[in-house]
Amino acid sequence: MLHDTVDRANIEEMVHEFYTIILKDELVGPVFVKTLGPNLHGGKWYEHLNTLYNFWILMMTGKTGYGGHPYPPHAFIGPLTPEMFERWLVLFHEVVHRLYVPEIADKFYTKANMLANQFMDNLGLFDEDDDD
Ligand code: HEM
């Protein structure tokens, strides 16, 4: 049954499911393997998953817990490409729609899409923002 509310338990389920899939993806998986290791039970992932639970709780409910800055790490883990962001978003879309009712899944996706665009903008990945 699809979740029709957002709570910590189902956010943990979603994040776990998403990064299990992400790690196996041939385009974006290697970036995560390189930075955090090859499986979700490894030491660095423990901390990262916890950060992501708190991040999504803040995004979706406004409850504090995540006090970080989501963009900075992305400036150093790459090079990231627009195709990688596109793949990340496709996989995220699939997972949130598999777990949540459409209205909630769309809210997750809208937030992720907004952040992805912000990150790409910061990374200078939009052609129309060229030089002059
Ligand atoms: C190509 C797409 C992406 C890749 C390959 C990627 C990869 C990563 C990696 C490897 C880290 C861990 C960095 C570290 O601990 O040193 C990270 C952190 C993070 N990512 Fe992404 N990411 C991508 C897109 C996104 C998007 C679209 C979002 C927003 C929904 C996002 C949200 C975050 C957050 C919140 C953190 C934790 C930042 C912190 O430590 O406070 N990422 N990402």
Image (spheres, rainbow, N blue to C red):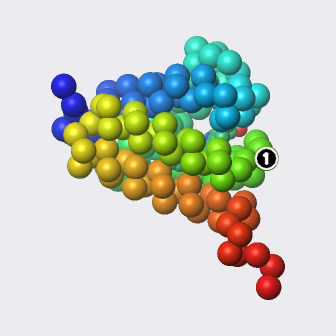
Near-viewer residue (17 or 98): 98
Identify the element where label 1 is drawn.
Answer: loop
Amino acid bearing label 1 = Pro
Q: Is mark 1 within 8 Å of ligand 1?
A: no
Write the residue at 71% across / 50% down: 81
Q: Residue 40, image x and y in percent?
A: 58, 19
Q: Residue at x 68, y 18 (%)?
A: 38
- In the image, ligand 1 is in what quadrant? top right
Q: Residue 31: in sight, yes or no?
A: yes
Q: Is any part of residue 66 visible from this angle?
A: no
Residue under numbered circle 1: 79
For the point 57% across and 29% down, which residue is it?
A: 22
Question: 61 or 128: nearer the eye?
Answer: 128
Does residue 99 appear to the left or right of 21 in the view shown? left
Left or right position of 27 against 95 = right
List x then y, in percent, for residue 120.
Answer: 65, 59
